[in-house]
Image (spheres, rainbow, N blue to C red):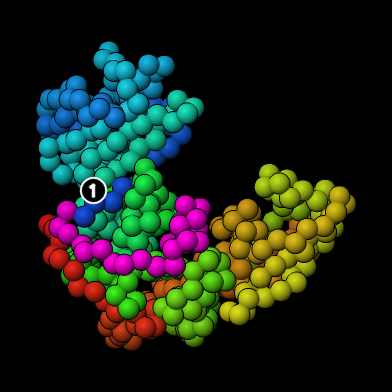
Amino acid sequence: MRIKIMSRLFVALFFLQFIFLPPLQADTQIRVLVAENQKMLKVNIRGEYQIRVLPTMQLVKKGKGLSDAWLVPTAAGVRIGHEEWACRGLLIQPAEDRDLVIGRSGFRGAISILKDKNNLFYAINSLDIERYLYGVLHHEVAAWWPMEALKAQAVAARSYALYQAAVSQRAEYDVKSNTSSQVYGGSTTERYRTKRAVNLTAGEVLSYQGKAFPAYFHAACAGLTAASSELWNISLPPLAGGVKCSYCRISPHYNWESRVPLAEIEEKLKKYGRPVGRTLRIEIISQTPSRRVGRLRIIGTAGEIVVAAKDFRVWIGGDKIRSTSFSIEVREDAIYFHGKGWGHGVGLCQWGLLGQALLGKTYRSLLEFYYPGSQIALNAATKTS
């Protein structure tokens, strides 16, 4: 997970430091936002299915097989081919798991397709938590990694997702399918070894003193993990940072450089309501306890501002500024960033996970290392087929 920031989580965490761990049942569901801002969506269903209108749940269509059916938002509701229903959206329920394809991606479970205020579609995939993880793990770690590393990632990803589901109960969805939560590719991207890691740890979640917490993770910490309090309003011993990790030196992302034109920085500052005119100078004015950049001063022809480096990174893009562990060099019309690590630095370091697993560490010891003081809670058995 590269930039794991959700504004809804920030608000929830302001009022709620951590929550009681809910019992995990076999049918624990998670709601994943898998598409948004879509003018139309193509649907294929291999077997039997039902379609219901939302929010009334009235059954309006059923059959066996649906080929290249285009869903189009209309002023009154939603149209499929020559059929149109006055509604806010549709719930598509295939009879068999993995029979549903939206666009080019296959999905387990059901899909709700809804219209937003701009009459554009967004889609929410509702499915069992374990099957959701089948579509997550391959995107977060490589399927060829040692099984102990895959198992540790499975427990962390499950813990993160269940925490998100708990704090998002009144929202329309729990997580997104991109890096703002954890990457989810549906059933199309499942791999045998990562599915096996999910099955081998089925129902296992991280807790602290019997309570759930968001088990954050990132690509590479570059030597030292960060405290969650450096980024968010949450402070717990398992996320207190300061874990020394030399194991991620094997990562190709351990050192990085990036060139960002001053014009691009000026454009982004203007977009996010912090214009300074033409940029004259950028300087680092503080560091965090984990030796990452805390705040930046940006001086321009129209004034100067002080910004948090974590926000600046999001504005410019996590692909260009891979972490807030960087130095700055201004050359003519661009700024050159020389940095270490990739991601926010909180919690589990994925490349460090690989490095330690290659040395023979077990998944339990790996989780204890990156989340000090945490325990693995064994919950009710979940479906793993």
Mark 1, secondary structure of its residue = strand
Q: Amino acid at mark 1?
A: Leu
Q: Nearer the viewer, residue 128 or 222?
A: 128
Would residue 6 be visible to someone looking at this image? Answer: no
Q: Residue furthest front?
A: 15
> Residue beneath label 1, please?
127
Q: Residue 205: say if magenta.
A: no
Position of residue 37 relative to residue 274, above or below, is above
Q: Residue 25: say if magenta.
A: yes
Q: Nearer the viewer, residue 211 or 187?
A: 211
Position of residue 34 relative to residue 2, above or below, is above
State the residue at coordinates (21%, 44%).
109
Percent x, y for residue 235?
A: 49, 73
Position of residue 105 relative to residue 269, above or below, is above
Q: Which residues are magenta?
A: 1-27
Q: Nearer the viewer, residue 167 or 381?
A: 167
Percent x, y for residue 279?
A: 81, 54
Percent x, y for residue 241?
A: 50, 79
Judge left or right: residue 280 versus residue 265.
Answer: right
State the residue at coordinates (17%, 59%).
25
Would residue 62 be visible to someone looking at this image? Answer: yes
Q: Quadrant of residue 114?
A: top left
Image quadrant occupied by the N terminus: bottom left
